[in-house]
Image: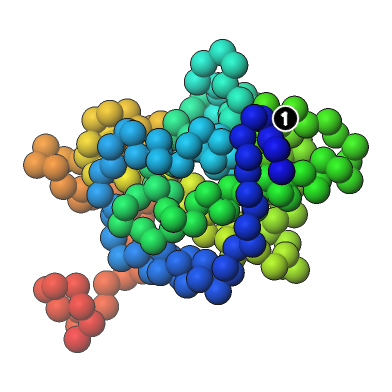
Amino acid sequence: MLWAGELVFTAPLDRRGLLKALAATTALLAAGPLKALPAEATTVLGTWNTQSLEAFADTLIPGQRRYAGDLAIAGAVTGPGAVQAGALQVLTSPQLPLAPWLPGIAGLLNTRALAWAATHLLFLSPTRPAFVGLPFSHRTALVTGLFDPDDPDRPVWQVLALMVGLAFDTAAHQPTTAALANDHPGLAWIGFPAPDADGLWRFPEHSYNRPLADLHPHTTASGSPA
């Protein structure tokens, strides 16, 4: 289809290959932190796909617009959201096998947005991606439906949502000490504490100001059960 002066081909996704990539991505995310990424890492996606994925991230964890005319961020709230927290840097991490699939996922998201607009009689400007063109309330309603148990592409959106959450809640694409030093918006929002002077976290106080259970008398010095 001809869209915004660009010829866009929407080829069907190889869902078996995509599911393998999603499974591998989930395993790698569980294995440990990602490496820090250069700021230009998202440029390989192109403006169209970047805006689509940023709009998806902003729908999950909204933030304020970065500049006048920011299309991807709806500006539904004040303060930084997932995009400012580095959601795209996490999605495009070279350590993860998902990056080659992101243009196809963005295309799938926009296809769903076109269908949504048609059924809700919404006009979408041809100068921006379909999902980006949806009002925020419709973005939210559409994304909510993507997680329906009957949705065939639910695993795709679940993994993307996990990565968006990790970007905001843990700064997964940066060392934690560097993220705190750079005032990472997600860590600042949740009040993540600074480390001790030697760069280590020890948390001497219990989160509920009391132990959750008495120490078993046979616990070894390392903290393991006897």
**Local secondary structure at mark 1:** loop
Is there any visible trace of residue 128 in the rendered image?
no
Is there any visible trace of residue 47 in the rendered image?
yes
Q: Nearer the viewer, residue 72 or 13?
A: 13
Residue 80 horizontal side relative to residue 6, left or right = left
Residue 57 percent across, percent down from the top left = 55, 41
Which amino acid type is shown beneath numbered disc 1? Pro
Q: Nearer the viewer, residue 217 or 1?
A: 1
Task: Name the image quarter holding residue 30.
Answer: bottom left
Residue 181 percent across, percent down from the top left = 24, 30
Residue 86 percent across, percent down from the top left = 41, 38
Q: Is residue 97 above or below residue 129?
A: below
Residue 78 percent across, percent down from the top left = 57, 22
Instruction: Give the number of callouts.
Output: 1
Q: Is residue 106 above or below residue 70?
A: below
Write the residue at 33% across / 34% down.
40
Q: Which residue is mark 1?
A: 126
Residue 98 horizontal side relative to residue 193, left or right = right
Write the residue at 40% across / 48% down.
92
Q: Is residue 199 above or below residue 76?
A: below
Instruction: In the displayed orientation, state which residue is furthest to the bottom.
Output: 226
Q: Quadrant of the C terminus?
A: bottom left
Write the residue at 44% across / 31% down.
84
Instruction: In the displayed orientation, state which residue is furthest to the top.
Output: 68
